[in-house]
Amino acid sequence: MQSYPSKLLEHAVNELARLPGIGRKTALRMALHLLKRNPAEVESLGTAIIKMRNDLIYCRECRNISDQDLCTICESPKRDHSLICVVEDIRDVMAIENTGQFSGVYHVLGGIISPMEGIGPQDLHIEGLIQRVASGNIGEIILALPTTIEGDTTNFYLFRKLAEFNLRLTTIARGVSIGDELEHTDEVTLGRSILNRTPYESGLARK
Amino acid sequence: MQSYPSKLLEHAVNELARLPGIGRKTALRMALHLLKRNPAEVESLGTAIIKMRNDLIYCRECRNISDQDLCTICESPKRDHSLICVVEDIRDVMAIENTGQFSGVYHVLGGIISPMEGIGPQDLHIEGLIQRVASGNIGEIILALPTTIEGDTTNFYLFRKLAEFNLRLTTIARGVSIGDELEHTDEVTLGRSILNRTPYESGLARK
């Protein structure tokens, strides 16, 4: 058991070591690094995470992280509000937004169904999605969940829940990444890309 | 440029990404992890690092990190105050304390002489060491600095500064692999290197 020359240091190391992927040695290195920074900078870090945790809210519509009751995407009149992309968490929203290819809105489930981890449908923001659909005006839902057993389970659960509504239900295309060589693509992906082949559009596909 | 759905989140990610070895992706993962923890826990982390930076002080005697004016080692009557082990930083103190092999006291230089990084003797806590020696009652000084050119330079500088005093000057035994850092050395080797310390011989040490 490591002994620390200061309770204040030990306490800070213990707290830092609870961050994901951070062991005690890394936490100590971080703490000693912080001691070399000026106090105002350390105060800035400390208050930033506290303020984020206390003041950050989730969009009442899509459950995306937001600074207001309604997120910037949901309140934008430029977005297509009849097109909802369903994702696991907010990192997926950020990744898709980065592509600049999606003009619809999102619905963040906050996880996927996983009996192994004890996560059932009632733990996810599925009820809110059903309500959005039930309120009408939704033309299409794109499922953009992971290609895992959990992702497939969640897709199927949503498919059954949404079957009664009159809308298009799609999933994002799975295929060979642009730039990847066929011989290095895994068999499942390659097989899927053949089954789900798309009509050839000369010159248009790659923009 | 990544766009964030919330200014609060973006600010927290920016702050976390300034920690050593933490990139923006890891910082985002940390921030989202913190959002899932309860607010009291996040507050505890934030205040722990702020309090550490503001309240932690350095021992006036040895410059070790401390919660009080005099560190627990320097104020202990059980330690041999005539035996000083000179180290680069407080991680070395922690590593040596962990071996349980050293009963003397420390002196933390806060770095080593490095012309490449613009660190000269005046930037280190060397004057305080000379004063401790000049005050008498010091029988031996163990140099436990890294086995690098900078470490050797610092050893030699201290050797000349301390030459006028009547004391034994030793270095830790070369049981520690050259190039390895003290904090990553196993306890047995590190402990043995304290027990088998050898007299300092300028220039010969590296042969």
Image: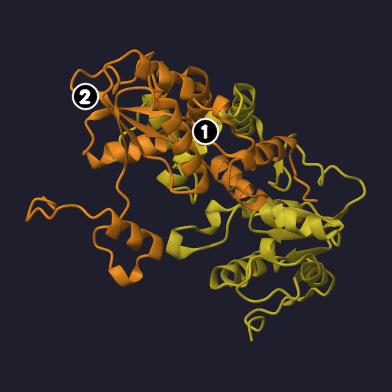
Chain colours: A orange, B yellow
Q: In front: mark 2 or mark 1?
A: 2
Q: Give the numbered dot on residue A79.
A: 2
Q: Residue at x 82, y 72 (%)?
A: B192
In screen coordinates, is A148 left or right of A95?
right
Q: Give the numbered dot on residue B54.
A: none
Q: Residues within 10 Å of mark 2 (few under 14, many from 20)?
A: some
Q: Residues within 10 Å of mark 1 (few under 14, many from 20)?
A: many
Callout 1 secondary element: helix
Q: Position of residue B104 (x, y in %)?
A: 84, 57
Answer yes or no: is residue A11 visible. yes
Callout 2 secondary element: loop
Q: Position of residue B56 (x, y in %)?
A: 66, 34
Label 2 amino acid? Answer: Arg
Q: Position of residue A6 (x, y in %)?
A: 74, 39
Q: Give the numbered dot on residue A42.
A: 1
- Which chain is indicated by disc 1? A
Which quadrant would residue B199 be assigned to in this image?
bottom right
Q: Residue at x 70, y 79 (%)?
A: B201
Above or below: residue B41 compared with residue A192: above
Above or below: residue A129 compared with residue A178: above
Above or below: residue A131 compared with residue B101: above
Distance (Cα) linking label 2 and label 1: 39 Å
